[in-house]
Image (spheres, grey):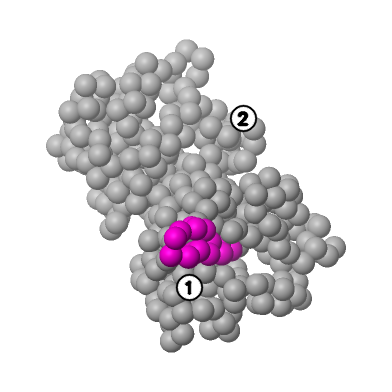
């Protein structure tokens, strides 16, 4: 019986956990045994007693949890003390942020771990239930609107009162992936007047289906601006200039702007210039979801609220899913449970088929080396 260990998240500000009592039950029913480091779920409101009731064994610390583990489930990549405690050949499954945290990948390879990056799970139908990027981005989009609304000094919906009418807030979402679509839906539910933009032509219909208006330069480059995997391509400087010109007059009238654009393996594209920020009214809010990858907004700083000279606040809040850790953990843990099913053979033994298209795409380290083509060189 393969043993899965779940340890505490050790990164500053990380409140999520890689298993919940519900997924522990399911993992055990699927043929795994589970060890949880004491306190691993407390920041996500999952007490140790609930894990024990679900059938997990409680370990005093990470070293004890990992001593006999065949598999390590994490939210973020493991830290040095956890990697040192791994048996050679242990399977590690986490959001490794492998393009950026290359030292972690190298350390896992050196330790002889077979590591899988959940962010590399391909966006194919069979893998939808394992798509951790989407599950977490969905919550990030929701939370971005909540954070923007909290920072905004006015109400979002139109209100007609005896004392007069309060106009609805104008909310502009830039980047219509999973996070952007949820931001649009949430902003609409809260009563905002919502517009959105994206370089991918397929998003126009999605935006309009949610009751928002779509804004984009719809030229030939725009029509071919999506990869086969559904990601946005990086646009030419010429297109970016045309798009910037179009949105400049629009953005000056907005109350809340939410930016969500990310390109795998590349710094986040700059969508909002300093001049555009300067054109906004005092009291306006910008929420930059891409701040951890360099930011979509000129002037955004990770972990800070930057207030500009003209009274605009730029929110650079990292790890938005971690601000709703209970639900974020529940969704991510279900992604991992689905992924775990690929690690067993038909007889229930731990024998991952590394030629399986999902495992092959997610594999980062094996046999003491980094083996993912995207990370070589």
Quarter containing the C terminus: bottom right
Which quarter of the figure has residue 276? Answer: bottom right
Between 127 and 178, the residue placed more toward the observer is: 178
For the record, the magenta segment spans 158-172
- Residue 88 seen in this snapshot: no
- Residue 209 seen in this snapshot: yes
Give coordinates of residue 3: x percent, y percent: 32, 26
Q: Main secondary structure of the magenta part?
A: strand
Which quarter of the figure has residue 73? Answer: top left
Residue at 52 percent across and 48 percent down: it is: 189
Between 213 and 316, the residue placed more toward the observer is: 213
Give the farthest residue toward the top.
347
Residue at 57 percent across and 70 percent down: it is: 254
Give the farthest residue toward the front.
162
Give coordinates of residue 186: x percent, y percent: 51, 49
Any magenta on residue 289? no
Q: CA distance from mark 2 to mark 1?
A: 42 Å
Q: Is residue 290 above or below residue 64?
A: below
What residue sits right under mark 2 in the picture?
Answer: 126
- Give SS at disc 1: loop
Label placed on residue 29:
none
Between 347 and 51, the residue placed more toward the observer is: 51
Quarter containing the N terminus: top left
357 relative position to 224: left or right: left
* Classed neighbour count for the residue bearing mark 1: other residues with Cα under 10 Å, few (<14), some (14–19), many (≥20): many
Between 86 and 255, the residue placed more toward the observer is: 255
Q: Is residue 205 above or below residue 175?
A: above
What residue sits right under mark 1 in the picture?
Answer: 284
Residue at 76 percent across and 54 percent down: it is: 201
Residue at 63 percent across and 47 percent down: it is: 210
């Amino acid at each position: 019986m393969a043993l899965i260990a779940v340890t505490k998240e050790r990164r500053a500000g990380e409140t999520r956990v890689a298993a919940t009592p519900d997924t522990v039950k399911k993992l055990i029913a699927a043929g795994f045994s589970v060890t949880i480091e004491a306190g691993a779920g407390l920041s996500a409101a999952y007490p140790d007693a609930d894990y024990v009731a679900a059938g997990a064994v409680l370990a005093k610390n990470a070293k004890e949890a990992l001593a006999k583990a065949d598999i390590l489930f994490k939210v973020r990549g493991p830290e040095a003390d956890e990697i040192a405690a791994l048996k050679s050949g242990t399977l590690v499954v986490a959001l490794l942020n492998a393009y950026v945290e290359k030292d972690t990948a190298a350390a896992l390879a050196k330790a002889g771990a077979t590591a899988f990056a959940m962010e590399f799970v391909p966006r194919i139908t069979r893998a939808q239930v394992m798509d951790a990027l989407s599950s977490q981005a969905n919550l990030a989009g929701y939370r971005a609107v909540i954070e923007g609304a909290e920072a905004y000094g006015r109400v979002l919906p139109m209100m007609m009162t005896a004392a007069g009418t309060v106009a609805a807030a104008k909310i502009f979402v830039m980047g219509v992936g999973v996070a952007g679509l949820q931001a649009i839906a949430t902003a609409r539910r809260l009563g905002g007047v919502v517009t959105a933009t994206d370089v991918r032509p397929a998003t126009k219909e999605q935006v309009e289906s949610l009751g928002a208006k779509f804004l984009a330069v719809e030229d030939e480059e725009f029509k071919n601006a999506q990869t086969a995997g559904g990601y946005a391509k990086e646009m030419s400087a010429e297109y970016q200039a045309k798009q910037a010109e179009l949105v400049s007059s629009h953005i000056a009238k907005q109350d809340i702007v939410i930016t969500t654009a990310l390109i795998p393996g590349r710094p986040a594209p700059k969508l909002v210039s300093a001049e555009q920020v300067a054109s906004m009214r005092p009291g306006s809010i910008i929420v930059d979801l891409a701040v951890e990858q360099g930011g979509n907004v000129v002037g955004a700083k990770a972990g800070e609220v930057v207030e500009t000279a003209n009274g605009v606040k730029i929110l650079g809040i990292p790890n938005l899913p971690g601000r709703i850790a209970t639900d974020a953990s529940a969704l991510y843990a279900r992604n991992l449970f689905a992924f775990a099913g690929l690690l067993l053979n038909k007889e229930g033994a731990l024998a991952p088929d590394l030629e399986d298209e999902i495992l092959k795409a997610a594999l980062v380290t094996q046999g003491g080396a980094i083996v993912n083509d995207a990370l070589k060189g």
